Amino acid sequence: MSAIVANELTQPIPPPWQGELNLTYVWQPARCQTQLQRSHHQSPLKVQRSFYPEGSEVCHTVMLHTAGGIVGGDRLRIQLNLEPRAQAVLTTAAASKLYRSNGPIAHQQITATLAPGARLEWLPQETIAFRGAHYQSQMRVDLAPGATFVGWEITRFGRTARGECFDAGDWRSQLEIWQAGQLQWNDRQWLPGHAALLQSPQGLNGAVIVGTLVWLGEPVSPNLLHQVRNLPRPLSGQTGITTSLGAGLICRYRGNSTAEVRTWLSRIWQHLRQQQWERQPVRLRIWP
């Protein structure tokens, strides 16, 4: 065995990341402004400087993962706190990548606590799950009366541009939304990497992308639901819209185009915030 190969084999494996991000938003009535009052981070997670593309009331924040992707064994924790009347939009600088793992599971845990009158719009760019990735994501949102959460999740299974499919690995996602101590929504999704599931109607049904948008905390009127259902839909993907949440809306997508699902969910998000909050449509500045 050559010295070079021997050195490579004896190189220690880098320890997994233990990333943390803790953000607190407060409403400053004297300035009519939401401010990011506290920002604590531990690599590889961090945020860019906040900006205000639609006025001082809504604070926009871009999250970064400086390591470039998530690997087996990583532990990422994000804590979001919105004080009364604070309004924040959070997105990511790029798509999240879930790299192949030799066995260890990567975990991401997100908790968000919203005080009365607070509004959180959680709009990360898509996640790309590589073949062989092992990943679990848990998100819990606690809403006070009068608080509203809007969030989406878009996941592509496999690097399809390279002909890769997600026929090995394991992906799990859980979203819990509570309001005033009552569970309002519990969404658990699981996709084990298996060729049969990729084609099964109970799985991806031949698609490679799934997307979900949730709006919860404010009632959606029958008229507004009718408007949302009549917005232009994707030409190729399968979609569904329901209001079985009591005080909210859920939209689902299953298809093959990131641009398609992003356009559709963005259209719904823009329409809801315009009708419910009287806010003009805004395009997330960092999105392509």
Image (cartoon, helix red, strand yellow):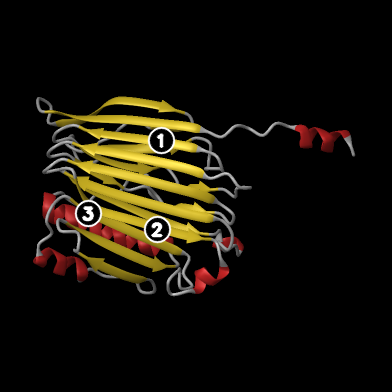
Where is residue 231? Give x, y as percent: 22, 68
Sequence-first tag of 1 and 3 = 1
Q: Which residue is painted at 30% across and 59% down in the image?
A: 265
For marks 1 and 2, give the one nearer the viewer: 2
Amino acid type at image mark 1: Arg
Q: Which residue is painted at 74% across and 32% down in the image?
A: 11
Q: Quadrant of residue 223?
A: bottom left
Q: Which residue is painted at 15% across and 54% down in the image?
A: 274
The residue labelled by disc 3 is 215
Amino acid type at image mark 3: Trp
Amino acid type at image mark 2: Gln
**Mark 3 in CB contact with mark 2 (< 8 angstroms):** no
Residue 77: mark in rendering: 1
Where is residue 153? Give x, y as percent: 36, 53
Sequence-first tag of 1 and 2 = 1
The residue labelled by disc 2 is 189
Residue in the foreground of this view, choosing between 211 and 286: 211
Give how far apart the Cα atoms at labels 3 and 2 are. 18 Å
Which residue extends farthest front?
182
Which residue extends farthest right?
1
Q: Is residue 78 visible?
A: yes
Q: Is residue 285 visible?
A: no
Residue in the foreground of this view, choosing between 212 and 180: 180
Give how far apart the Cα atoms at labels 1 and 2 are. 20 Å
Where is residue 216? Give x, y as percent: 20, 52
Q: Is residue 117 above or below residue 242?
A: above
Sequence-first tag of 3 and 2 = 2
Where is residue 131? Give x, y as percent: 58, 57
